[in-house]
Structure formats: structure tokens, C-alpha cells
Amino acid sequence: MLTVDSLKGKKKIAEVFRRGRRFFSPAAAIIVEYNEAQSQHQFLKTMIVVRKKTAHKSVVRNRIRRLVRECLRQFLKEKNRSGYKISFSSIVVFWNIAPAHPALLRLEAVNAILQPLLERACAYKEKTS
């Protein structure tokens, strides 16, 4: 099973930006790097970007990061349960909206924004392979 881990290192991040496939929505954008081999990675490397211009307070930025990470975990668990093999090796998430107060942002809202992007990324991989 895949676990969510941090994407670290300048070269690795640059590689994801160079080779990754981009998917956009008004509230978020993701860059997905797919596995070349069909073997399933043990870790899904993630980087979550929330700009200070988007959310001025660090409490709000960190809550967004935690909720996005949890959304990714739930998505992986759901896909694994249904027997679908995730072919992502790295994901970069750019979050573009923020509430005024951290308690106003809920997991359901993050799921509603991120799930369609992740589904489109899975569908793209299915279509191209």
C-alpha cells in the first residue's frame, strides 16, 4: 500500500515540474509524475504549496496542508480498496483559496476540490497506457 511522504530535494522537485502532467481547477492545481514501471512505489511523494498571499496566517496554511494530506490518504485507501493500482510517484498540490478562519475549512470541502483533479489524473493515465 502507498503511504504519503514529503517530496524533498531541489533536483527531485525540479524533475516533477519538468516531467509532470498538470491538472487545474479554480481552487487548486496539481502536478502529477507517473511511474515508468508498473511496480507500485512504497511512498507517494507529495509537496503542498499554499502561498502567503492566499492565506496570510500560518495556522490557515498548515490546516490546508493537513487536510490536503488527509484527502490524499483517503483517496489512496479508496483506490486500493477497489483494486486500482495507483501509478503516481509524486504529486505537487497548489492550493489557491483560503477561508478567513481555519475552522471554516473542512475535509469535505477539500475533498470536493481535490477528488475531481485526482480522478482526472487517474483517467489520463488509463487513457495513455
Image (cartoon, rainbow, N blue to C red):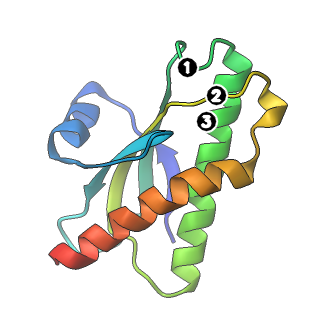
Q: Which element is circle 2 on?
A: loop
Residue type at the position of mark 1: Thr
Q: Residues within 10 Å of mark 2 (few under 14, many from 20)?
A: many
| Residue 25 falls left or right of residue 10 | right
Which residue appears at 26% of the width and 78% of the height? Answer: 126
Q: Position of residue 10 (x, y in %)?
A: 27, 25
The quadrant of the rendering that contains the C terminus is bottom left
| Mark 2 → mark 1, Cα distance in angstroms | 6 Å
Residue type at the position of mark 3: Arg
| Mark 3 → mark 1, Cα distance in angstroms | 13 Å
Q: Earlier in the sequence, mark 2 or mark 3?
A: 3
Work out whether 116 lies above or below 66: below
Which residue appears at 71% of the width and 32% of the height? Answer: 63
Work out whether 59 lies above or below 84: above
Q: Position of residue 56 (x, y in %)?
A: 63, 12
Q: Nearer the viewer, residue 97 or 4?
A: 97
Q: Which element is circle 1 on?
A: loop
Q: Position of residue 107 (x, y in %)?
A: 72, 50
- Residue 23 shows in the view: yes
Label 2 close to label 1 by CB (< 8 Å): yes
The residue pinned by badge 2 equals 98
Q: Earlier in the sequence, mark 2 or mark 1?
A: 1
Instruction: Name the residue at the right extreme.
Output: 103
Q: Position of residue 67 (x, y in %)?
A: 67, 44
| Residue 78 falls left or right of residue 39 | right
Q: Nearer the viewer, mark 3 or mark 1?
A: 1
The residue pinned by badge 1 equals 54
Q: Nearer the viewer, residue 13 or 31?
A: 31
The residue pinned by badge 3 equals 65
